[in-house]
Amino acid sequence: MKKVNPLYEGKAKILWETDDPALMVQEFKNDATAFDGTKHEVIEGKGRLNNTISSHLFGLLNEKGIRTHFREKISETEMVVERLEMLPVEVVVRNVAAGSLVRRLGIEKGATFDPPIVEFYLKDDSLHDPILSEEHIRVMGLATPEQVTGLKNAALAVNETLGSFLLERNMRLVDFKLEFGTVGGELVLGDEISPDTCRFHDAKTGEIMDKDRFRQDLGGFLEAYNEVLSRVSS
Ligand code: ADP
Ligand code: TMP
Ligand code: ASP
């Protein structure tokens, strides 16, 4: 398998076409962005950390029988993935109230949800990724009702597996965002699973170990990502 052309460059990653039409190389960049890309910094080492953390977590999900696009990590910043037809929908699972949920609804930060909340957002920066109801998804034709059920079930299965794996490593999975696509009609988890797309808190101290350190200018960004990597690989 050989890398051929960059097909898409986003805020945090580059997707490369390969000589195998079914496979792509997903390369993680050092760029950190927030607030629809309006806050931007290049952080040396971030690409390597997110690729390595994401490879570990996808590997775990594959082992547990959850269908993901991940095939293998091929360099410090690159992984081979299956090429998917992406759904323009972001699926967010929340175990603990944080971020936009607290800002939008005034729910107390730190409130816990059992069962967790599953939400859908439209993947469109120009509209600021608005929240979607299942009715919106239906009328906009973004996914079929069967796919919506599949997305919810898959997101909850990821939450179960990831949540207990992380808790054994002294991390609390507060919330996270997933992106799915299809191949041959089958729903497959794509994109990344990293401290950029999840909120991880130290289970004992509550210390923030994710991109909120960048969003909120808390400092200690690389230290936190390195600590996540060391716990995830233990
Ligand atoms: P953004 O598009 O939000 O700036 P990224 O920089 O993370 O995001 O770019 C990665 C892009 O690749 C995203 O649009 C994501 O939906 C897409 N993608 C992720 N996994 C796959 C895959 N397996 N096949 C095709 N596209 C994918
Ligand atoms: P939120 O509280 O800002 O809605 O974020 C919920 C989760 O989704 C959090 O773990 C961060 C993640 N997320 C992304 O991965 N990309 C995004 O663009 C946003 C807004 C959130
Ligand atoms: N990833 C998004 C952006 O770059 C937002 C975020 O994660 O806060 O704008």
Image (spheres, grey):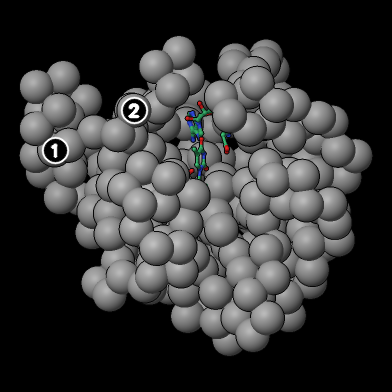
CB of mark 2 near ligand 2 (< 8 Å): no
**Could you say where residue 95 lies in the image, as x and y percent from the top left?**
39, 67
Q: Which residue appears at 62% of the width and 41% of the height?
A: 80
Q: Is residue 89 left or right of residue 98?
A: left
CA gap between label 2 and label 1 equals 13 Å
Mark sitting on residue 42? none
Are the residues tagged 2 and 1 within 8 Å (C-beta)?
no
> Residue placed at 77% from the left, 44% from the top?
217
Left or right of 92 on screen, residue 35: right
The C terminus: image quadrant: bottom right
Q: Is residue 19 visible?
A: no
168 w.r.t. 57: above or below: below
Q: Is residue 114 above or below residue 155?
A: below
- Residue 18 in the image: state x and y as whole percent: 62, 24
- Locate residue 61 relative to residue 115 in the image: left or right: right
Name the residue beneath numbered marker 2.
130
Determine whether the beta carbon of the residue marked 1 sits less than 8 angstroms from the nearest atom of ligand 2: no
Q: Nearer the viewer, residue 63 or 228?
A: 228
User: Residue 94, percent across and down?
Assistant: 38, 60
* Image spot of residue 192 (x, y percent): 56, 45
> Count the marks: how many?
2
Looking at the rendered structure, the secondary structure element under dot 2 is loop
What kind of element bears circle 1? helix
For label 1, the residue is 134
Q: Within 10 Å of the Cα at label 1, are there few (<14), some (14-19), or many (20+) other Cα atoms?
A: some
Residue type at mark 2 is Pro
Q: Nearer the viewer, residue 39 or 66?
A: 39
Residue at image location 69% in from the left, 63% down from the top: 209
Q: Identify the residue at image location x=78%, y=62%.
A: 224
Q: Closer to the camera, 116 or 207?
A: 207
Could you tell me the amino acid type at mark 1? Glu
| Residue 114 in view in this figure | yes
